[in-house]
Image: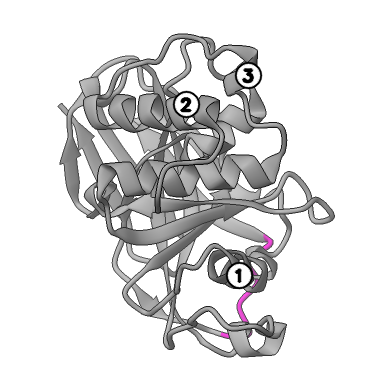
Amino acid sequence: MTSLSNPDLEILAERLAAAQAESSLILPPAAAQTPRDVAEAYRVQQRVLALRAEAVAGWKVGARSPRDEPHAAPLPASGVVTAPAQLPHALAPTFGLELELTFRLDRRFEPRPAPYTEAEVLDSIGSVMAAIELVSSRQPNWPGSSPLIQLADLQNHLALVVGDAVPYDRGAFFESLPLLFEYEGHCIASGPCRNPAGDPRRLLPWLVNHACAQGQAIGPEQVLTTGSYTGLYFPETAGHALAEIEGLPPVSLRLV
């Protein structure tokens, strides 16, 4: 992707790309450097990935409620790791942990003029896994910072720790999941927990068509993570996170 036509947004993309690579913060952007709408924020996302010369190993997608428009961001390959994982606690100045449900599709969706149907996408779900997302921001006043800059900043993505996959069960109930999420023996969440988007599978057809509209294909090699069942937990010290969703292999992350 060539430079953005808006020089102020190009400056924002360059600063975000550098801050992501260096695990640092940017200065509060000037008003002119704030995307005016989600379309501009998504263009900044794509420019950030181009500046980092990163392959896309997956996508994150979520929605605030079952009725709200989803939002999404591509996941740089360098930040998608397999559990059990070990990452530095100093990976970012501030970050939180979320427990999420993640999918892989069993076919490739290339950009095309006509949108893909819900049935085409949902019939392609091949496997499911638990994942811990590390959520952060390159803005110093996060989480009370500009939502559009958060979206441009890969929707606050830092890293994703992905558990082992199991075959997808079309009849599974995903709106509420029995789970246990602990950090250093402290219970972050337990029992049936809900995804704010409702059934997260509803996000996948939207995501596929969104990615294709951005000129990005989605294929079986990518992981698609679909929002938190537990909210954000901010680990203040190094330690061990363990996440278990009923019926799925556990996810282990050690912060050192």
Residue for point 61% across, 77% down: 172
Q: Is residue 128 above or below residue 200?
A: below
The residue labelled by disc 1 is 204
Q: Of label 1 and label 2, which has the lower sequence position?
A: 2
Spatial separation of the CA atoms under disc 1 and disc 2: 29 Å
Q: Tag 2's secondary structure?
A: helix
Residue 62 falls within the magenta-colored stretch: no
Q: Nearer the viewer, mark 3 or mark 1?
A: 3
Quadrant of the snapshot with the C terminus = top left
Residue for point 27% across, 43% down: 52
Spatial separation of the CA atoms under disc 3 and disc 1: 33 Å
Q: Main secondary structure of the magenta part?
A: loop
- Residues in magenta, as a range: 170-175
| Residue type at the position of mark 1 | Leu
- Which of the 4 quarters of the picture holds residue 235? top left
Query: Residue 202: x, y in percent?
Result: 70, 69
Q: Tag 3's secondary structure?
A: helix
In front: 84, or 53? 53
The residue labelled by disc 2 is 12
| Residue type at the position of mark 2 | Leu
Query: Residue 69: x, y in percent?
Result: 77, 53
Q: Is residue 124 visible?
A: yes
| Residue type at the position of mark 3 | Ala
Q: Residues within 10 Å of mark 2 (few under 14, many from 20)?
A: many
Query: Residue 71: x, y in percent?
Result: 64, 50
Q: Residues within 10 Å of mark 3 (few under 14, many from 20)?
A: few
The residue labelled by disc 3 is 32
Q: Of label 2 and label 3, which has the lower sequence position?
A: 2
